[in-house]
Amino acid sequence: MDGVNLHLYPGEVLAFLGPNGAGKTTTVKMMAGLLYPDGGQVRLLGKNPHQDPWALRHLGAMLEGNRNVYWRMTPLENLVYFGVARGLRLREAQRRALELLEKLELKEKTHTEVRHLSRGMQQKLSLGVALMHDPEVLLLDEPTLGLDVESALRVEEMIREMTQSGKAILLTTHQLEVAQRLAQRVAIIQRGRIVLEGRTAEVLARFAGEHYLIELDTPLSPQQLAALRSLGLEGQGPTYVYQGDNEGLWRLLEALKPLPIKKVARAEADLLEVFLKVVNHV
């Protein structure tokens, strides 16, 4: 790792992105107290979890690729076990477990051994384990991986509810559309170094550039298009692209009169486009 410096704030999701081998898992495991950093330190609500293990009571982690639950125990048994292990009284752990099974739509599988559950159900149960002790900070690694569309949307809804309640969430995922929907901030790591960090909306705006989409009712004739290329219009229609400043855009729109225009909109970058540009130019 090379000077990685991340901050999580209450009430927001930080999407921590990077290609395989970039250092995401290593960073997350250090934050979770599973790896000791060679240099620097981790602070969890002001405490160092490597020196004070009780600090980890403030943290909930769901690590993809690891067994977050015991396969020969039922969902209820798993939740109660981990709840008690993290300081809940037995009665409180049982109440909390039943509440989470309902939220995660696992109530019908309450007494089914985990090894008999689908991948998606196991994934939701792993999220439940991370939430059992109601931690202030959550490390979520691929929380929607393996879920059907409806279940994935429910998990996204739960993450939004958690941020609204003030939790700080570090989200790692290769599903960049999920990160774009959920994260207020984004950080991209490459070869152990943070190469981009900022608020999601500002990052997307920075990479959008001066591209505009112009949609006409019908495509332009070859002669019309040839005449408008000098003004910056490109494409095959009926949707065209203009790249330039606002002044040039108005000149182009004036030249398009009286053709019927359906839409003029500034082209927006998405997080996938930003990610590919950043990691391929480092």
Image (spheres, rainbow, N blue to C red):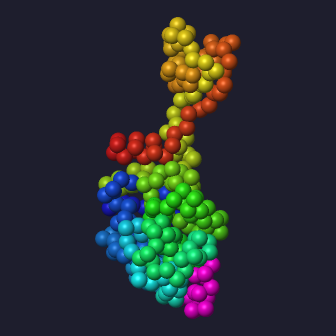
- Left or right: 5, with 203 as reference point: left
The stretch in magenta equals 87-99
* Residue at (39% x, 74% y) in the render: 67
Determine the image quadrant of residue 273: top left
Can residue 11 be seen here?
A: no
Residue 237: image location, x then y, percent: 54, 21
Residue 38: image location, x then y, percent: 30, 71
Please give the count of numbered marks on the rendered protein. Answer: 0
Determine the image quadrant of residue 131: bottom right
Q: Nearer the viewer, residue 66 or 251?
A: 66
Q: Quadrant of the C terminus?
A: top left
* Residue at (63% x, 78% y) in the render: 99
Q: Quadrant of the N terminus?
A: bottom left
- Confirm whether the magenta stretch covers residue 139: no
* Residue at (44% x, 65% y) in the render: 141
Above or below for 53 versus 233: below
- Left or right: 225, with 218 as reference point: left
Above or below for 140 versus 114: above
